[in-house]
Amino acid sequence: MRHKSPKSPPIVRKTPVPAASWLLAQGCRAARMAGMKQHDSLIAPTRRTLLHAGLGAGALLATPLAAIAAAPAGFGAWRDNFRARALAKGISDATWTRVMGRIEPDMSVFRQMQKQPEFNEQIWQYVNRRASDWRIINGREALKKHEALFSRIEQDFGVERGTLLALWGVESAYGDPLVQQNHMRPVFPALAALAWNEPRRRTYWETELINALKIVDRGWGTPEEMRGSWAGAMGHTQWMPEVWLNVGIDYDKDGRVSPFGKPDDALGSSARYLLNRGKYHRGEHWGYEVNASGTASGGSRTYAAWASAGVTRADGKPFPQPNASAQMWVPVAGGPAFLLGPNFYSVKSYNPSMNYALAICHLGDRILGAPPFIHPFPGSERALTLAEVQEVQTRLTKAGFDTGGTDGRVGNDTMKAVKDYQAKMGLLPADGYGGLKVLARLRQGG
């Protein structure tokens, strides 16, 4: 939901926001794939593709902050004309002057739109990159720090802490302030450029610019702290301004909905969204990896019925709620099989990609201590450890391939560096996945 790339819940306004409209406004990275078959999501959407739906932080963690160019001819006249529309929508003159009075458009957003790297990921690569060692380690630290908050959310909404931790980690790296400072850009210059000079969806961008001004007007954020993606997605959950206005809740009861700072509002809002919009079932797990050799996979059955048909959990444990219902899913022939309960599809309502939902659910389990999948995907590699990812980044950087940092987080800069290295070394496919094979080749030198 975007998603960025983030939060979630129901509604502060009286008229419900349609789910599809909400996903679009919020910038769900996979909104355009909602009607695809499950295997279609094996192609990771690029940020250029995501223009039509906004962005989550995960796709931007390695994007360098571009300089804001001087205002080009024509922008001043547009800004003067736009002022009347903003004031007619309730924006105060003081807020307009504070934010827009001397603003210059960030024209680099148009380069961002046109120069997005393409990466094709198999499902195991997609899951490995999101359920990374860095996110697992830091997710556990985030849980320790915010134990009371997650306990309260579970009591109020019944949403498992692992799911929320995974969403938070994928969308904004647990709200890491260094990500905000180094890899996000000021939202207002970006939205001003798009509202002024992006011809295909100018009305949409103008609306989002006004929504961002409303956030300042309401005291929810300041222009200085409102940093996000080039498309305007911002905060812990990488939501677009409209989503913060229509979906965000004041969970910490401080009188405002806060995209930044404490994560209470973002995580509480996400839980409420999953419960109300995603029809989350309190007390149920999302599903389980199973042994299902030769078992027909059609339809929904109770776990007890699946067990009677010979389906067992891959870890050998019993199904804790035999009367709950689930559907069988085998993403790739010969790979792991899963029984998916309603809460898997609740996560999928956040971002309509089966791969995204599986990665979130698996990452949540890993943060809480579960092992990797027991049955590997065909042709897969285990995920690299944090130290191994850092080694890949360090060796690539020394070899002249800029990874944008060596902290163990993999974004588009690292993937591009890997892809360029693969192409140079003749490592096929040159898919940008920095796994064991790439690490082995780097260790050989050359």
Image: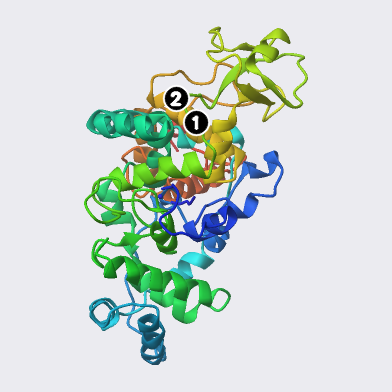
Q: In the picture shown, does residue 154 fall above or below 315? A: below
Which dot marks residue 361?
A: 1
What's the image's color scheme?
rainbow
Q: Amino acid at mark 1?
A: Cys
| Place of residue 386 in the rendered image (x, y in percent of width and height, measured from the top left) | 36, 30
| Residue shown at the point (69%, 49%) measured from the top left | 35
Q: Nearer the viewer, residue 329 or 391?
A: 329
Q: Nearer the viewer, residue 101 or 398?
A: 101
| Place of residue 335 in the rendered image (x, y in percent of width and height, measured from the top left) | 66, 23
Return the residue at label 2. Answer: 365
Q: Judge left or right: residue 295 versus residue 4.
A: right
Instruction: Give the CA distance from mark 1 to mark 2.
Output: 6 Å
Q: Identify the image quadrant of the C terminus.
A: top left
Mark 1 and 2 residues: CB-CB less than 8 Å, in contact? yes
Q: Amino acid at mark 2?
A: Asp
| Place of residue 52 in the rendered image (x, y in percent of width and height, measured from the top left) | 56, 63
Q: Judge left or right: residue 358 versus residue 291.
A: left
